[in-house]
Image (cartoon, rainbow, N blue to C red):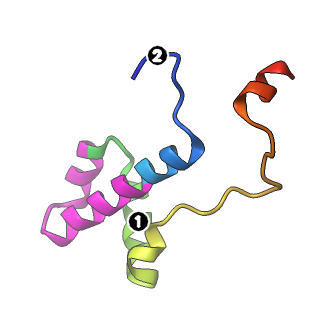
Amino acid sequence: MAAEEKKSYKDEMADLERRRIRGVQKILDGVKPIKVARELEVSSSAVSRWMSKYRQKGWDGLKAKPKPGRPIIFGDASGDAL
């Protein structure tokens, strides 16, 4: 991907969800949480939060929360003009 290309918000959230799921799956497979944190380049407290959410709500607990506020109704081209 070129440096000037930017991922959409949905793509970024999907990437974060995949990282959370991958991290929890590794822990369920027996990898220590601290090692998962290092591999995924996140804090050990983040991994702990993922596991807590997984225990409370299952895989759905790892999904990204919707962005608050009113949705943007104009496209990128009109946003650049502002």
64 or 3: which is nearer to us? 3
Question: Mark 2 vs mark 1: which is more N-terminal?
Answer: 2
Q: Tell which tag, 2 or 1, sits nearer the viewer.
A: 2
Location of residue 21 by image quarter:
bottom left
Indicate whether 36 appears above or below 4: below
Residue carrying label 2:
3
| Residue 36 x %, y % | 24, 53
Indicate whether 34 appears above or below 4: below
Q: Residue at x 50, y 44 (%)?
A: 12
Q: Is residue 22 left or right of residue 7?
A: left
Indicate the quadrant containing the C terminus: top left, top right, bottom left or bottom right: top right
| Residue 75 x %, y % | 74, 36
Seen from this angle, which residue lies furthest left?
30
Region of the chain picked out in magenta, as a range: 17-39
3D distance between C-alphas at marks 2 and 1: 30 Å
| Residue 44 x %, y % | 35, 53
Q: Residue at x 20, y 51 (%)?
A: 35
Identified by mark 2, the residue type is Ala
Q: Residue at x 68, y 56 (%)?
A: 67
How would you classify the magenta stretch by its main secondary structure? helix
Indicate whether 77 appears above or below 70: above
The label shown at residue 35 is none
Q: Can residue 68 be found in the magenta stretch?
A: no
Q: Can residue 26 be found in the magenta stretch?
A: yes
Q: Residues within 10 Å of mark 1 (few under 14, many from 20)?
A: some
The label shown at residue 50 is 1
Identified by mark 1, the residue type is Trp
